[in-house]
Image (cartoon, rainbow, N blue to C red):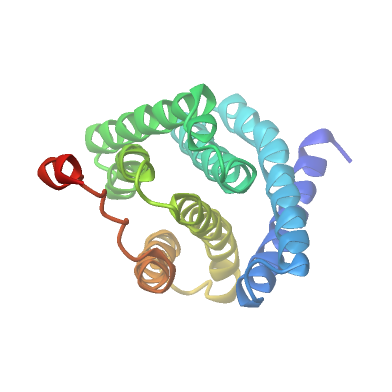
């Protein structure tokens, strides 16, 4: 068995484990020791996806599949950003400045730049999928800036960063699962339609999940208290 086949098997195995653990952690009571442990194993599975994905990107370029290699590399960048954010938002929940540090902004800039580039590539070659999905990277950059702005007066900033990143990871794993599984389950259906559904359906579900979680856990940042100078002087 060659190295490429090993990478494919490792990628599929890690992805299957991640998909199962995503729903396992998602259905558990949040913050419990078991939830944290499952989440840690989930992130390790996601790391396996990233590591095994690198040789797949290289193989795509080696076969002359430039667009496919660029897009797969872009997806790996998105997953890298969301995995880092999911991990560090918990580790740095008492130190927002450490979380919003050089690594965060480097990954954010990388993802946003890659997203704009993928969108531009999609427009140049007439690919609606590339041009649309590339905007996800740009939205990550905008969301990062908004998260940084609200973190100064929002005690739940780390929770929003965490579940936002986990939703992003869930989108990635479900896109991969649907992209491969649907073609085997529905071979008679047009492959282009299946691919479009595999990429867009998880995004719409993620948007709904983010809205629900923001309603449940997010709330509004606590307003900054203003000191009445006149009252303070009279006191």
Residue 84, located in which quarter of the rendered image? top right
User: Image check: 163 left or right of 216?
Assistant: right
Residue projecting furthest to the left: 230
User: Image check: 146 left or right of 151?
Assistant: left
Image position, residue 202 (x, y; %)? 44, 65
- The one of 70 and 217 positioned closer to us in this rendering: 217
Residue 15, located in which quarter of the rendered image? bottom right
Q: Residue at x 16, y 39 (%)?
A: 233
Relative to 100, residue 211 above or below: below
Relative to 36, residue 225 above or below: above
Q: How many marks?
A: 0
Image position, residue 136 (x, y; %)? 35, 46
- The one of 216 and 110 positioned closer to us in this rendering: 216
Relative to 115, residue 16 above or below: below
Quarter containing the N terminus: top right
Image position, residue 184 (x, y; %)? 60, 69
Q: Residue at x 58, y 33 (%)?
A: 60
Image position, residue 169 (x, y; %)? 55, 54
Q: Residue at x 37, y 61 (%)?
A: 196
User: Image check: 158 left or right of 3?
Assistant: left
Residue projecting furthest to the front: 234
């Amino acid at each position: 068995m060659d190295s490429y086949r090993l990478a494919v098997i490792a990628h599929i195995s890690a992805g299957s484990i991640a998909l199962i653990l995503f729903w396992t952690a998602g259905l558990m009571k949040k913050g419990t020791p078991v939830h944290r442990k499952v989440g840690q194993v989930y992130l390790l599975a996601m790391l396996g996806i990233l590591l095994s994905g690198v040789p797949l990107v290289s193989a795509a370029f080696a076969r002359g599949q430039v667009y496919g290699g660029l897009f797969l590399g872009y997806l790996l960048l998105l997953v890298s950003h969301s995995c880092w954010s999911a991990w560090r938002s918990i580790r740095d929940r008492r130190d927002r400045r450490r979380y919003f540090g050089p690594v965060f902004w480097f990954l954010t800039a990388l993802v946003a730049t890659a997203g704009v580039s993928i969108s531009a590539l999609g427009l140049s070659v007439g690919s609606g999928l590339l041009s649309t999905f590339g905007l996800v990277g740009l939205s990550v950059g905008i969301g990062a800036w908004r998260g940084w702005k609200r973190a100064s007066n929002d005690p739940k900033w780390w929770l929003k960063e965490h579940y936002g990143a986990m939703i992003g990871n869930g989108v990635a794993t479900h896109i991969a699962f649907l992209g491969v599984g649907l073609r085997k389950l529905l071979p008679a259906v047009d492959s282009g339609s299946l691919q479009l559904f595999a990429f867009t359906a998880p995004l719409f579900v993620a948007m709904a999940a983010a809205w629900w979680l923001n309603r449940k856990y997010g709330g509004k940042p606590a307003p900054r208290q203003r000191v009445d100078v006149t009252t303070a002087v009279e006191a």
